[in-house]
Image (spheres, helix red, strand yellow):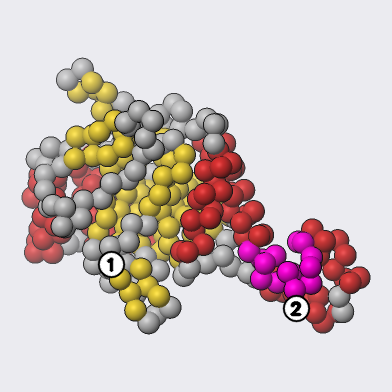
């Protein structure tokens, strides 16, 4: 399991020094990857871009299943717009289609049947007990992963939604933040306690709130202490800040901040000189993480 968090900062296209500021989406997660409770490793980025200004973070008991879903979503959306209804529907379809493929492989290949054939002729071709058992297993099959999808539509509006078993999708444009994973409840409680709001908080406060929510969620089982954080702006592939910003914020939070907003930490974020790099032409956007070694 893990904790993945996303929050929007959308100040109605605030203008500063003649330039549009925002909107932004601030995201964070731990980097722990566990193997069946036997061991775990740090340093795994649980985030992947799949279409234009759209990315997804991953949580669950089997995140190995996530990459085929993301690849399928990429193919379904290839050459298409980034309109929210289209991305929303196609990501749901990618999840449901892949789940159906996995269920067919696990439960029906031995009978040389497709899912459609099982639904149409299963009762006729299989004895009652076998059909009932397969029906129960198929109905309750869980792919083992959940996605926190975030991005910007073609009009530059930010969106957040989740897709989970069996292809259920939920939109969180209001309240403008959400979390998934083992630390979900703790993270959401902290964001609410800090008064996170898309229009009322500055970018620095939003970054602080997301990081504080992640740090608090580390009390949950299987949530790692290392933090990956990214600030997404439409049309930009990366952001730059002062070295060791996240470590500085965590140190202040641990010593002085929790659970209230710590203005000293917010000031450190404001002074970190966050700037954004545009998409290089012809190069797919990557969510870049500065590891401790790189810093």
Residue at 9%, 64% (x, y): give it. 255
* Residue sitting at the far right: 124
To which residue does mark 1 refer? 42
Q: Which residues are magenta?
A: 102-115
What residue is at 46 percent from the left and 70 percent from the top?
Answer: 61
User: Is residue 45 something that shows in the picture?
Assistant: yes
Q: Residue 133 got which mark?
A: 2
User: Where does the image place residue 99, in percent across and percent down from the top left?
Assistant: 62, 60
As helix, strand or loop, the secondary structure at mark 2 comes to: helix
Relative horizontal placement of residue 257, taking residue 180 as reference (left or right): left
Q: Position of residue 63 (x, y in %)?
A: 46, 64
Circle 2 crowding by C-alpha within 10 Å: few under 14, some 14–19, many from 20: few
Q: Are marks 1 and 2 in contact (CB under 8 Å)?
A: no
Q: Identify which residue is drawn at 30% across, 71% down.
A: 41
Question: Is 281 colored magenta in this rendering?
Answer: no
Could you tell me how far apart the alpha carbons at marks 1 and 2 are, in whole angstroms?
39 Å
Q: Residue furthest front?
A: 282
Front tag of 1 and 2:
1
Q: Is residue 190 visible?
A: no
| Quarter location, residue 59 | bottom left
Labels 1 and 2: the sequence-earlier one = 1
267 horizontally vs 223: left or right: left
Percent coordinates x, y for residue 179 in the rendering: 39, 56
């Amino acid at each position: 399991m893990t904790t993945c968090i996303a929050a929007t900062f959308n100040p109605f296209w605030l203008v500063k020094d003649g330039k549009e500021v925002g909107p932004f989406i601030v995201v964070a997660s731990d980097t722990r990857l566990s193997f069946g409770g036997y061991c775990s490793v740090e340093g795994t980025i649980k985030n992947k871009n799949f279409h234009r200004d759209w990315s997804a973070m991953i949580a669950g008991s089997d995140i190995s299943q996530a990459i085929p879903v993301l690849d399928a979503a990429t193919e379904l959306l290839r050459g298409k717009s980034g309109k929210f209804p289209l991305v929303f529907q196609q990501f749901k379809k990618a999840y449901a289609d892949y789940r159906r493929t996995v269920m067919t492989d696990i439960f029906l290949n031995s009978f040389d049947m497709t899912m459609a054939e099982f639904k149409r002729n299963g009762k006729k071709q299989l004895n009652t007990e076998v059909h009932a058992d397969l029906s129960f297993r198929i109905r309750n099959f869980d792919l083992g992963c959940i996605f926190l999808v975030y991005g910007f539509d073609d009009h530059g509006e930010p969106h957040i939604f989740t897709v989970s078993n069996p292809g259920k999708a939920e939109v969180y444009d209001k309240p403008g933040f959400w979390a998934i994973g083992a630390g979900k409840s703790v993270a959401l409680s902290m964001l609410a306690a800090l008064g996170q709001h898309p229009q009322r908080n500055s970018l620095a406060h939003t970054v602080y709130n997301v990081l504080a929510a992640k740090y608090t969620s580390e009390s949950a089982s299987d949530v790692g202490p290392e933090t990956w954080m990214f600030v997404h702006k439409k049309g930009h592939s990366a952001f730059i800040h002062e070295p060791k910003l996240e470590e500085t914020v965590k140190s202040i939070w641990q010593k002085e901040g929790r659970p209230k907003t710590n203005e000293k930490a917010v000031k450190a974020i404001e002074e970190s000189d966050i700037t954004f790099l545009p998409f290089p032409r012809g190069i797919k956007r990557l969510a870049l993480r500065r590891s401790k070694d790189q810093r």
